[in-house]
Image (cartoon, rainbow, N blue to C red):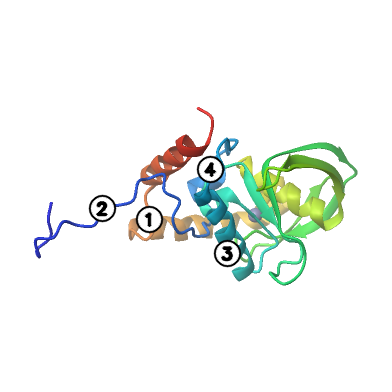
Amino acid sequence: MNDASGNAPSARPPLDTIGQLELVEYPHPALRRVSRPLVRIDDELRDAVRQMFEIMYAEEGVGLAANQVALPYRLFIVNTEGRPDSGEEMVFINPQLSKPRGSAVQQEGCLSLPGLRMDVRRPERVRVTGYSLAGEAINADIDGFLARVVQHEFDHIEGRLFTDRLSEASVIEASRTLDGFRDIFAGKQSRGEVPDDQQIIARLDALERARCQA
Ligand code: ZN
């Protein structure tokens, strides 16, 4: 179909083109999707990681998982300093966690649940393995704040949020905030500011087909 000027409308990019990324907030369906391992690292993906760092710094975060920018991949980034000019930029591809030890409670927040901060209990130490963006093997025993951030981000790629790990009393406290997020998201979808769930899932499926094992 042509527009009134007689020109063909510009073609939409294919669904599996990564393009410009945006942070998504709860209850965007990407956040509940179990991410699939990456088998293909291409320039588009490297550009996506660069965008993820920009988004993370702009939002003053210390970690960001791919599904928080609606990419269904087992990938997350961390810089515990949260600033481009300090700390270490870490990229974890197809990560796995093992050897959880100890237990600690610490307050957490999440860029996909802005404003909500709650105490979360997690193992104090953990081993993380996986690959860097350059394809180098990662194998590290980590503790402290880095272990906290890595476990939070790993939860994301498993489709989990920190609100799934709250104590019973905290769940009640958080539930009103979560209801509010759901109302806001439904409003954005009804106004067409966010695609509907069916469109979101079609794009996630296409992105998955492009870079994950069949
Ligand atoms: Zn988060």
Q: Three-letter amino acid code at disc 1?
A: Gln
First in sequence: mark 1 vs mark 3:
3
Q: Circle 3 is placed at which residue position?
A: 55
Q: Position of residue 86 (x, y in %)?
A: 76, 70
* Residue most extreme to the top: 214
Dot 2 lies on which element?
loop
Q: Three-letter amino acid code at disc 4?
A: Pro
Q: Residues within 10 Å of mark 2 (few under 14, many from 20)?
A: few
Q: CB under 8 Å between callouts 4 and 3?
A: no
Q: Circle 2 is placed at which residue position?
A: 11
Q: Name the side, left or right, on which 119 lies relative to 203.
A: right
Q: Circle 4 is placed at which residue position?
A: 72
Q: Name the side, left or right, on which 174 lies relative to 192.
A: right
Q: Name the side, left or right, on which 104 lies relative to 205.
A: right
Label 1, label 3: how many angstroms apart (C-alpha)?
22 Å
Q: Position of residue 189 (x, y in %)?
A: 38, 55
Q: Is residue 110 above or below residue 35?
A: below
Residue drawn at x 69%, y 45% is 154
Q: Residues within 10 Å of mark 3 (few under 14, many from 20)?
A: some
Q: Three-letter amino acid code at disc 3?
A: Ile
Mark seen at residue 189 = 1
Q: Three-letter amino acid code at disc 2?
A: Ala
Answer yes or no: disc 2 within 8 Å of ligand 1: no
Please indicate, yes or no, whether residue 181 appears anywhere in the rendered image. Answer: yes
First in sequence: mark 4 vs mark 1:
4
Pick the residue in front: 120 or 88.
88
